[in-house]
Image (cartoon, grey):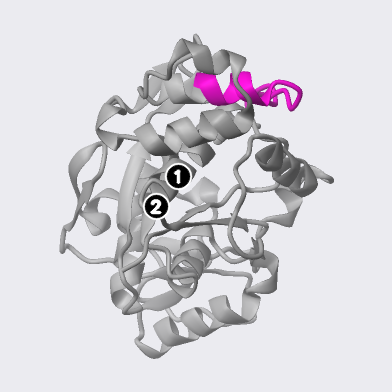
Amino acid sequence: MSVIGRFAPSPTGPLHFGSVVAAVASYLQAKSQYGQWLVRIDDIDPPREQSGACASILKTLEFLGLHWDGEVLFQRHRQDAYQEALDLLFDKKLIYRCICSRKQLQGNAYPGTCRLKEHSSEQQHALRIITNQTPVNFNDGIQGHLQQNLETDIGDFIVRRADDLIAYHIAVVVDDAWQGITEIVRGADLLDVTPRQIYLQRILNYPTPAYAHIPAAVDADGKKLSKQHHAQPVDDRQPASTLFSALNFLGQQPDEGLLQGNVEEIIQWGVKHWSMEKIPEQFTIEI
C-alpha cells in the first residue's frame, strides 16, 4: 500500500515555526517512503479565518520547498460529504440534538444532559455523538501506546456546532478517509483528540491511519506557539535557515554544512536521513 500523508492547516494566519515543523515532519515521513504528501486547507470556521492567510500559507510551503502532490483540497467545498456522514450517524441513532450552553456545563466530560431528550429541530442546537465505555487504544509512532475512555473522560462530543458549522472532528475524519490518508503526523497538542477521531472512523467504517504526534513548540512560558498567542510568522526570506531549525527541533541532527546550502539540498538531505525514532518522545519542546 502506498503511503499518503497530509498537512492540513487552518487559514487563521500565516505559518509560524510550530506549524512549519509539523509540515516538515509530515512531508519527510511521506517522502522518505516514496509516498504522496497532500495539502488540505481546514477552512470550516469562517469567523476565525484571516483574509489572505490561505495564500500566505501556500506561498510559505513553496518557499520551503515543500511541494504537495495533486490539488489543494478546501474543506469549505466538502459540506455535502460531511452532511452525508451526519445523516448516516442519525440513521444509526448515534447523534442527538443538544441545547446546552457552555455556561451550563462544568467539568471536563459532558454529562449527557440532552442524551435522552428529544429537542425540536426548531430550537438552536448542536449535534453530539453518543460515546460508550469501550476504551479507544492506539499506538502512536512517537508518543507510544495511549488509551482513553471517551464516555468517562470526554463524554458525548459535538459533531456539528450550534451555529450550524461542522465540527473539526467529523470533517477531518471524512476527508482523511476520502483522500486515502494512511499516515498522520502532527503536533502533540492534537494527541488528546485522536481517540475521538478513531471512534468516528470505526463507527463510519473508515480505515484508521497510523498516527505520530511530534512535540509541540512552546515559548518560555510553556505556551504553545499559535496564532492565538500571536506567534511570529516564519520569515519567507530565510527558508533554508527555517528548514534547518525544523530538522534540529525534530532531532534529525542535520549537518552544519547544510546552512550554506539551498532549500532543495536541505530537503533532499532530510528525505534521505529521516528517522522518526530520533524525534524526542516529549509533548512539548521550548524554543
Residue 115 drawn above or below residue 185: below
Q: Residues within 10 Å of mark 2 (few under 14, many from 20)?
A: many
Q: Secondary structure at mark 1?
A: helix
* Magenta-span inclusion, residue 233: yes
Residue 278 in percent (x, y) is at: 28, 27
Residue farthest along the bottom direction in this orientation: 91
Q: Nearer the viewer, residue 4 or 55?
A: 4
Residue at image location 69% in from the left, 67% down from the top: 76
Residue at image location 25% in from the left, 58% down from the top: 151
Q: Secondary structure at mark 2?
A: strand
Amino acid type shown at disc 2? Ile
Residue 30 in percent (x, y) is at: 42, 50
Residue at which label 1 appears: 26
For this view, does 97 lie left or right of residue 42? left
Q: Quadrant of the N terminus?
A: bottom left
Residue 40 in percent (x, y) is at: 60, 58
For this view, does 7 lie left or right of residue 204? right
* Magenta-span inclusion, residue 100: no
Return the mark for residue 7: none
Residue 32 drawn above or below residue 73: above
Residue at which label 2 appears: 184
Q: Residues within 10 Å of mark 1 (few under 14, many from 20)?
A: many
CB within 8 Å, label 1 to label 2: yes
Stretch of the chain drawn in magenta = 228-245
Amino acid type shown at disc 1? Ser
Predominant secondary structure, magenta span: loop
* Alpha carbon distance from label 1 to label 2: 7 Å
